[in-house]
Image: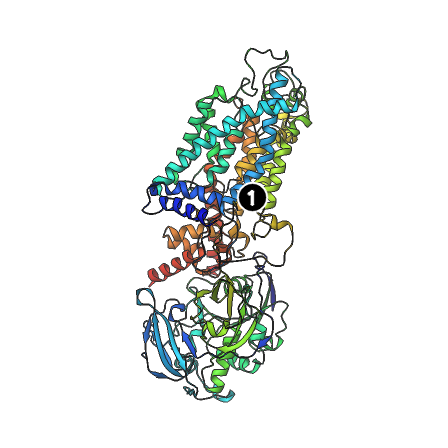
Amino acid sequence: MTSKKNLGEKIRSLWEEGGRFHKYWPLFEAFDTFLFSLGTRTSRAPHVRDSLDLKRVMTIVIYALVPATCFGIYNIGVQSRMAHGLEPDFLLSVWTGLLVFVPLLIISYGVGMFWEIVFSVIRREEVSEGYLVTGLLIPLIVPPTIPWWQLVVAITFAVILGKEVFGGTGMNVVNPALAARAFLFFAYPAQISGDGVWFKLVKGRAVVDAFTGATPLALGAASKDMGLTAADAITRQYSFMDSFLGFIPGSIGETSKLAILIGAALLIYSGVASWKIMVGCLAGLCGTTWIMNLLAGPDSTGMTTLSPLHHLLLGGFLFGVVFMATDPVSSPETSSGKWVYGILIGVMTATIRVINPAYPEGTMLAILLLNVFAPLIDYVALRINIRSRRLRYAQ
Amino acid sequence: MAVFTVRKGLDLKIAGSPEKTLSKAVSSRFVALKPAEFPGIKPKLLVGEGDAVKAGQPLFHDKNKPDVMFPSPAGGTVREIRRGARRVITDFIVEVDETESWVEHESWDETRLAQASGQEIIDRLLKGGMWPVFRQRPFGKIPDPHLPPRSIFINGMNTEPLAADPDLLMRDREKSFHFGIRVLKKLTQGRIYLCLKADGREQAFAGADGITVHRFKGPHPSGLVGTHIRFIEPLKSGERIWFLRTIDVADIGQFFQTGRFPVERIIALSGEGVKEPKHYRTRLGTRASDLTADRLENGSFRIISGTVLTGTEIQPDGFLGFYNTTCSVIPDSSRRDFMGWAMPGWKKFSTVNAYCSSLIPRKHFPFDTRLHGGVRAIVNIGAWEKVFPLDIHLYYLVRAVLAGDLQEAEALGLLEVTEEDVALSTFACPSKIELGAIIRNGLDLYEKESI
């Protein structure tokens, strides 16, 4: 035991002040505190502190992402096998999924952590835990066919220009994972949208006759031209239950609403993510689509007729709401601001999905837009607070 | 009377609450006054090492307000004037004589008090060394005797963890308390508020005429003066209030009645490190080692003059503070847990339900002196607000102070808080930000710039 401890001290001294690798101290610190929690003591009142630290906060979010990740891996295989007309055998599906997902995960953490450590070393700061969650989110919000090199470029863009230029975790304006996705969306639209990207197909193997490759929302968007309501166009291929459980094509983590709800329950119970934002988002989306349904009238076709429930079950809305809109750094700090922010995300998503002909899905753009507006929302909430205080002073 | 309910807050489930019994007296051969615990005071010595002093005789006064005197807690000899970093005086140590002599002031009765003017009373409080029991909001410092307050708040609560029981501290002191109230009435044209806990039985104090009684229920900080002011009568721009505790009022009454500076204190010795946590009768500024002798468990502990939320760490040969009625002894630890971030954490306490410990109700959690994490940029998951009942946007207040934007900070409520009001938020912060230090820094800057 003692010799083990001595070896530990010896290794440690290499990285400490005066040691050979002191320049890379953040790297050692990150690894060291990964293994053992920090033993630092309080130097002033309060003398006792909450056991919660940022590592634990991020860990909770990762735990919450586990169900969606596991199902996502399985579903990659299921979708691929069904497109080829094969039985969705469980083990083979998981195997196919792992072959797709694990490289994406390795790329994501490898590239992201590389940049995090580079910036920590430059800034002489401890490595922040922010990327732990971002690194898992990114592979979950891309299609399974995303080219690896594009992912590398997107992550580099997101970490450097989405976060580090603002000062790192805690200072960023937009959610870094969404920044990565937005980069892919606008730089390489062919690989992240349309009908060709949602199924991992094996080259040379035949696909089933009816295979279109379209996501449910894409079917909905096209329904008007076919003279159908969006719901009819979608349910011809995907039942409500499939949409809820997640047996539909889409970005890897977004398809299973059940898995996402399990994660949401953990986030809300633990208090790590704001339920106000989640409820606000749902209210915004349901309210807006309900009004659109009413305005559309009985005999209309196309997306305006799609019910709020369908909107919730399809696309990346629920995933975005639970895991990305609630990012504490890029969402408003004030309680009233959280409500406004959430509702507006819902409204914007519905508007883009229904009214904009170019994009079948609007969650990402809605969240990014409201990320940018979050400081403004807070500003208004603060002015109201300041005004009420001034009125109190003036009495 | 009104009953106010504080909803946001937290009563720490920490082991070692003091029994509500008073044990035999603890005597100390050495007692001390600690200039550093009076914020904003620049001490100017009035006696030197080796000088003989009487109990109640001023040891030092404030350079900026020379009439604010700080009295010796005992009659004897000034044994040592300890200095810390940058020659700041940390302890003014007096060795207690067996035959103590006292500074004797005239003892007053009701009629004498009725004839006295406000100025006469202030002069007597200043001269007798009683003035430091008053503190003012904003800033939480000893007030300027020449600037009268809007109102006076008397605090009969102590909701901090492991704190002394205010009822026990006030036992048999009704007469002094009522005399003290009459003294206070001469100091202000405004109201005098008495804040008590909702389920308290202190009817004797509530009966004092001419004061307004309000009751508070809910978790800490329902017993902090900052909370009381905000709920009862918020501060307006340019206003100030004075505040003190029920025991201070009784001390003032006793001082006027007997003519002697009251040096007796009741201290709760509490915390996990104490064998039998209870209250002890002792003297102001008593030495920690005399209080803790033979009363501690074996192990490594931190001794805190005050509570775990707002107290000051002292060494065993250090002394208890002027305002402290609690001496907390908690385990000192720097243990490192293996992969603590991933483990279930059955015994770890958190204000948010981040550990499995939240699934099972527990009476106590093992609290020690660890920070539990590295200092990070602020990532606000709502932990600060969860335990903070005032209508202040703490995140933006802290940001404004850090940016040096004092005008914005004031608009956001800087003057309504001191470090004790944000202690729970500091406790709960996952990024381990020292909110108390930031707020105190902001208050100091504000004061400096407004002169």
Is residue B349 at all visible to an observer of this figure?
yes
Residue at 59% over, 24% down: A95
The answer to which image quadrant residue B64 occupies is bottom left
Residue at 63% over, 11% down: A209
Q: Is residue B248 above or below residue A354?
A: below
Where does the image place residue A111, in percent across and percent down from the top left?
43, 31
Task: Give the mark count.
Answer: 1
Nearest the eye: B275 or B347: B275
Q: Which residue is mark 1?
A: A274
Local secondary structure at mark 1: loop
Q: Counting other residues with Cα less than 10 Å from the Cα at mark 1, is it few (<14), some (14-19), or many (20 or more)?
A: many
Is residue A287 at all visible to an observer of this figure?
no
Where does the image place residue A143, in percent across and percent down from the top left?
53, 24
Q: Is residue A357 above or below residue A118?
A: above
Where does the image place residue B313, in percent across and percent down from the top left?
44, 64
Kind of residue at badge 1:
Ser
Nearest the eye: A61 or A6: A6
Where does the image place residue B216, in percent across and percent down from the top left?
59, 65
Q: Is residue B251 above or below residue B273?
A: below
Nearest the eye: B15 or B195: B15
Q: Give the chain letter at badge 1.
A: A
Residue at 44% over, 65% down: B312
Nearest the eye: A289 or B86: B86
Q: Is residue A182 above or below residue A14?
A: above
Q: Which quarter of the rendered picture does the C terminus of chain B lie within?
A: bottom left
Q: Which quarter of the rendered picture does the N terminus of chain B lie within?
A: bottom right
Instruction: Report the colour scheme.
Output: rainbow
- Is residue B329 shown left or right of residue A17? right
